[in-house]
Amino acid sequence: MFKDAIREEIISLNTYPFASVRIKKAKSTRLFLNKEQIEQLKNHKSSFGQTDTYFRDMFIFSCYAGGLRFSDVVTLQWKNYDKNEQRIRLNIRKTKRSHQFKVGQSALEILNKYKKETSEPDDFIFPIISEANFFEQSNEYQLKVIGSKNVLCGQKLRRMGKELEFPFSLSFHLSRHTFATQALANGMRIEYVSKLLDHSDIGTTQIYAKIVNEELDKAVEQFIE
């Protein structure tokens, strides 16, 4: 949970109680959802309230919307979405870079689900943050709110993952891994995937390409057995 928040830059590395502890790194593993698991999550019916549905939809949206981080999805406003061009434009909170991409059909369906006739440009797309003057508050306050929502989202997703019997702990960051691996598996060029993920170094994206190749190897091995 701490590492996810640091990765999102919701909390500072300085607040991590084990920041000074150096442990030899094991081989990095990127977990992700396959297509069947995405569909299972899409169809998941929660008995714990509407907030669960919001967080689930945010996760699915990220899977189809360039792997946007939680901090960017939860603060998306309708003014970030150009309906005519079906394009999202925003400044990434972590990197401060300007970012834009065309919205595919699966992500568009989620946007249409939340769009109301009464929706205003400054309204949040996903009704998680309630403060109307949120962006007028200090950055420290914004990070605190986003952090608390991220913790709640993590709790909700982990419970959903357990209910669906996923063989891993479900966290929002897995939506980012899921987008990358699915995009590469479907033939998207690695430099395009890197751009959509807002990676500064394509070497980071190549980790996902290695995963896709390993999955293909497993599929071939199972086929020829």
Image (tube, rainbow, N blue to C red):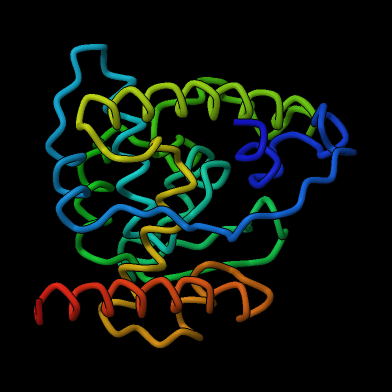
Q: Nearer the viewer, residue 130 or 116?
A: 130
| Between 200 and 211, the one nearer to me in the picture | 211
Q: Quadrant of residue 198?
A: bottom right
Q: Name the spot of residue 104 as percent of width and height, x first.
A: 26, 66
| Residue 180 location, quadrant | bottom left
Report whether 160 appears left or right of 225. Answer: right
Q: Quadrant of the C terminus?
A: bottom left
Q: Is residue 98 above or below residue 155?
A: below
Q: In the picture, residue 16 is in which quadrant?
A: top right
> Residue 70: image x %, image y %?
52, 42
147 displayed left or right of 32: right
Q: Residue at x 85, y 38 (%)?
A: 21
Residue 29 against residue 23 in the figure, above or below = below
Vertical side of 185 occupied by 137: above or below: above
Q: Outermost residue, top direction?
A: 48
Where is the N terminus found, in terms of image quarters? top right
Nearest to the observer: residue 177 or residue 116: 177
Left or right side of 132 for 15: right
Name the residue located 74 percent from the left edge and 27 percent from the top edge. 137
Residue 2 in the image: state x and y as whole percent: 66, 32
Count of residue discs: 0
Q: Residue 188: horizontal and vertical position, in percent?
A: 34, 83
What residue is rendered at 70% in x and 24% in y? 144
Tell me: residue 73, above or below residue 119: below
Q: Residue furthest front?
A: 225
Identify the residue at horizontal 47%, vertical 50% (top origin). Answer: 79
